[in-house]
Amino acid sequence: MKNGKRHGIFRKVCALASAAVLSLSLAACGNSSGDGAQAKEWIWVPEFITVDEENVSYYDMQLVGDALYSTSYIYDEAAGTGYNSICRYSLTDRNMTSVPLSWSGEEENWNLNRGSFTEDGSMYGIVNAYNEDHTESTTYLCKFGADGKQVFCKDVTDLMADSYPEMVALDGQGRIYVSADTNVLLFDGEGNSQGKVSLDAGGNGWIRSIGSDKSGKMYVCYYNNDGYDLAEIDFDGKKLGANYDNFNGGNGSGKLVPSIDKDFIIQDGNKVYEYDLKTQKQEELFSWIDSDINGNYVQTFGMLEDGRFLAVTMDWESNDNGIALLTKTRASEVPQKETIVLASLYGGSDVQSVAVKFNKANEKYRISIKTYVDYNSWDGDDYEAMWADALNRLNNDITSSNCPDILDLSGLNTEQLVAKGVFEDLNGFLEKSDKVKREDFVENVLNSYTFDGKLISIPYSFQLQTVAGKASDVGSEMGWTVEDLIAYADAHPNAQLFDNMSKSQIMMYLMMYNQDAFIDWTAGECNYDSDEFKSLLQFVNRFPDDVDYNSDDASTPSKIQRGQVLLYEMNLYNFEEVQLAEEIFQGDATFIGYPTMDGSAGCMLVASQTFAITSKSGQKDGAWEFIEEFLAQEVDPDRGFSGWGFPSMKSLLNDMAEEAVKIEYWTDENGELYFDENGEPVVMGTGGGFSYQDGWSYEYRKCTQEEVDKVFELIDVAKPVSNSQGDEIMNIINEEAEAFYKGQKSVDEVASIIQSRVKIYIGENK
């Protein structure tokens, strides 16, 4: 890819690979219970290879035979020119070779898109070439030989006029396939067009990946209305052939990956599977975490002929990229560690990242992640049912002998679990720790996760969610009641309270901040038949059933300034975001917050990477060691804090606050100041912003101390909310309230039914 200077992950020169380190830190079994800790007969042991080449591109690496191929752009700063090249990294002798690509076209400026390599080293790719002033472009389908020389170059500009080329693949006969939006363009081995296969008819959708199986037949994975489908491509008939079900669409580089034993290999970020076309079923090979790999960072993967498994990883957070060769090994031959089971609803990239880091460094314990949300079985329709099923299975594990050691609290109803006595008190661990102390953390963050004196978790980072309003309307102090909100809406009948807010959304916000007013989990009581809840139902009924989003609609800030919308939801993940409220309300803003039954400040503390130890755990010391190491991790001074939002560690938060107001100016190589068009010195660390289609825009500036202090005020009053994703109580409320909204039942009848159902649910889940 050409861009004048080196681009993104492309570096400058190809050289030799460094020696690899064989990881022997894997465990096959442990003392804890749970699926994640069951003894395994086989472990895929990784050998991690670091390629010390500035020019290596992990982004587009492709496994062909026993080598990894990629394209790179090498730029000579002294000469002011550069060239595209093919790089080949041998997995046998661990050497890298580079071959420049020759371009015989008339255009001097050309970009090489991701292509496809063959075993003889040839490459087929799409080239975008531009005239001298970049006002016109031509698209070519090209073949380059192993020597880098151009074999053919076909103008396909007209064929690509209505779509964007994404992937190039070859079948066993050397015919070329190019995926472009919802089409697969067909070419013979010489690059001559042979038509296309369109997937946009009959409800079919966008292409996920293409590729051939081990026999050379070409297939396409595409998104249909109910999930991913796999279909054979009939080249001669220019249509889709046989269709296959139960294919989850997982891949790394956008190409289907052939298997040796079966037909395809797929991965979903957590596990690796083999897919069999005959049975239309997938069979698990291994879990990424068991091989000390974060599956969300896997860019390319595949099976070598000798049976080893290859994974190319790109960690965009730490820039720790590399290659892993996995060897299937009997578990009895691998040094054992004590397994700690971490239960997570969906086991996201952040959870896997910290687990992998711990597993590589710790000699005694290892983390095994057990997830509950199964996106592979989701049919695309009943999202709530998928979440409800995941929560039920997790709750069953928690209350059984299968209880995990650590819970990832993301998406869980913490107060409900507290009432069940699920959590271990971390205060004792914190007092004995020589790595972290209570005074190291933001006090309100600890208080927010303390129940009846028991500290259940210490979040690593957090964001804030609240509501801003016009101070001259709502007052200058934070906090108001639901009655105040209703009165405010009554006083402005021609304006919306929130932009594009439906019944279910406003009910969710009202319940998130007020569920405590209607449920006492400890006592097992609820009062959804109260007058207060009935008034909420009547208020929610004012909002539309659904919201139709119009891309041509005015932006929310514009609507607020026109008086069409009254309130603005704020998501604060850094100190600069607080500036938006004053800009939108033109200097007349108050962080009034979401309404609460008692009038307290409705500011949500949205915590990230929040782990708790279960009281049933048989590995409490090891579980605390994991949490302790995670909280005490050092921050890279060059990259800064990499968590989501604000750090819970006070020292890091204070550093962030100081940086937000720190004024430094840009200077040249002689130390002389740069000045803007107004003659003012240019401040470092400013700029960046956003704009809407209707023209409303904002560019961030350095914060004032008053703005930073305002964020600290919000941090001091913020608290987590009770509701979880797929929360059954919210499901009950929304289901039964529908009859009232449609006029089929009175508010008293609906409130009574909700009260009865929720009371039964609480009794069953207390």
Image (cartoon, rainbow, N blue to C red):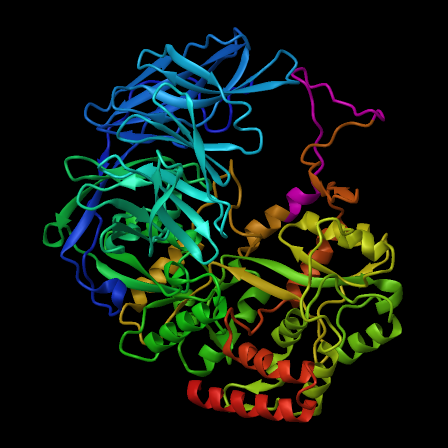
Residue displayed at 43% across by 47% down: 222
Q: Is residue 91 left or right of residue 390?
A: left
Residue 615 at what x, y percent from top left?
Answer: 35, 76
Residue 490 at what x, y percent from top left?
Answer: 85, 76
517 over 619 or under it: above or below:
below
Q: Is residue 343 left or right of residue 380?
A: left
Front-lying residue, 264 or 173: 173
Q: Is residue 481 left or right of residue 386?
A: right
Residue 443 appears anywhere in the view: no
26 over 100 or under it: above or below:
below
Front-lying residue, 142 or 452: 142
Residue 537 at what x, y percent from top left?
Answer: 69, 82
84 over 686 or under it: above or below:
above
Residue displayed at 63% across by 18% down: 136
**Extreme residue toward the front, this view:** 237
Residue 623 at what x, y percent from top left?
Answer: 33, 64
Residue displayed at 27% across by 63% down: 36
Front-lying residue, 213 or 89: 213
Front-lying residue, 193 or 454: 193
Circle count:
0
Q: Is residue 672 magenta?
A: yes
63 over 537 or under it: above or below:
above
Most common secondary structure along the magenta stretch = loop
Q: Is residue 504 magenta?
A: no
Q: Over which residues does the magenta segment extend?
A: 657-679
Instruction: Give the quadrant of residue 214.
Output: top left
Residue 499 appears anywhere in the view: yes
Instruction: Give the quadrant of residue 351.
Output: bottom left
User: Which corner quadrant holds the C terminus?
Assistant: bottom left
